[in-house]
Amino acid sequence: MIISGNNPAHVQQAVDALCTGELLGLPTETVYGLAADACNETAVAKIFQAKGRPSNHPLIVHVSSVNEVKKFARVVPDFAQKLMSQFWPGPLTLILPRQTEMAAAAAGGQNSVGLRCPSHPVAQEVLKACAAKGVWGLAAPSANLFGRVSPTSAAHVQSEFGDVLLILDGGECEVGIESSIVDCTRGVPVLLRPGQISRTQIEQACGLKLVSPETLNSEAPRASGTLKSHYAPTAKVRLMSTADWQKALAALGPHTQNLALWSVQKPSYELMGAGLYWRAMPEDATEAAHDLFSVLRDFDARGVRTIWIETPPNTPDWEGVRDRLKRAAA
Ligand code: TXA
Ligand code: MG
């Protein structure tokens, strides 16, 4: 059931559900989360079950402010502190050493915990009201079935889990792709997942170079969002250069069928066969991130079998979008 994030009685209903161990579809500025009390093992188990996600894949714990961090994290390195003061509330998740007694199930049994303080006003309201009732953190993965495209609207969440799930509507997500994740448990910052906050911004804020996970030979933590194939729509996704899709489209001529194209360049009138469904890719990376998942869902809803996507520029601002596209195409 979708309820309104603008209605105080509905927000209260959502908070009550969370505080009694129920699940909630929670809006954040990145994507919608499937939230539960991070310290309630039974509630956390419901998340893994609903998503069909292996229970050893750790979830992000959302907090209302930096004040709750010490409840969940044992140590906060200096560079992590800097990242929090610069980017929280906002689309950045930090992996920190976990307080042994806290949120073990949510952390998938790892001795670290992922923490994020979202900026979405409705998420903030819910988190503050929960904290006032002693629920210090909300575990929330993206509110989609395991391996599927993340939801950026309440309707998307409903299409994943049906009407039985309580969903708090906070409108369309502004960012559109999941938070950047920085592992702060290895002495140096390690970028596990790129997002809207870019590599350069992170390095500037903490005064350290980001290390990539591949260069570390210790065993990497399990991270679903970093699986090679993820964020996949039902249709097959192919990344193509402008020249390549133009050539391929010309070769198909009027025989185009069940094909979708997301590109900055508009196909010429002659190439627009009846079976081609085109949507414009914004030239700006932030706007493209905002549109990405809803475009993929829209193509799927139209029953297309193949999705061609124009390869975005190889520049730092596109890193988050490029990452999701590569996984969607894998
Ligand atoms: O923007 C976001 O981060 C969204 C919204 C809802 O906040 N959440 C999200 O959660 O994307 P999820 O579960 O779909 O992705 C979280 C990623 C996963 O790849 C998970 O494995 C990783 O974070 N992660 C969480 N805790 C971790 C830990 N202790 N160590 C390593 N990776 C961790
Ligand atoms: Mg996810």
Image: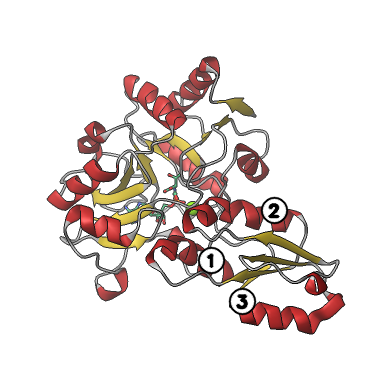
| Image x and y of residue 285, in percent | 48, 58
- How packed mark 1 is, by other alpha carbons closer than 10 Å (few <14, some 14-19, many 20 or more), is many
Which badge, 2 or 1, is on the more N-terminal residue? 2
> Which of the two residues, 188 or 48, is positioned nearer the viewer here?
188
Indicate the secondary structure of the residue bearing disc 2.
Answer: helix
**For this view, does 81 lie left or right of residue 124?**
left
Distance between the alpha carbons at the discs numbered 2 and 1:
15 Å
Secondary structure under the numbered disc 3 in the rendered image: helix
Q: What is the C-alpha distance between the residues marked 2 and 3? A: 22 Å
Kind of residue at badge 2: Asp
Q: In the figure, is residue 24 to the left or right of 238?
A: left
Q: Looking at mark 3, is its residue's CB closer than 8 Å to ligand 2?
A: no
Residue 325 is labelled as 1
As rendered, which of 165 and 111 lies closer to the eye? 165
Q: Mark 1 belongs to which amino acid?
A: Leu
Tell me whether the residue at label 1 lies in contact with that at label 3, contact meaning CB atoms closer than 8 angstroms. Answer: no
Q: Which mark is residue 53?
A: none
Q: Nearer the viewer, residue 233 or 145?
A: 233
In the rendered view, tell whether residue 244 sits above or below residue 302: below
Indicate the quadrant where residue 251 lies.
Answer: bottom right
Q: Mark 2 points at which residue?
A: 298
Image quadrant where residue 64 sits: top left
Q: Do the residues labelled 2 and 3 touch (CB within 8 Å)?
A: no
* Amino acid type shown at disc 3: Thr
- At which x and y percent is residue 263? 63, 66
Circle 3 sits on which residue?
242
Crowding at dot 2, Cα within 10 Å, few <14 / some 14-19 / many 20+, comes out as some
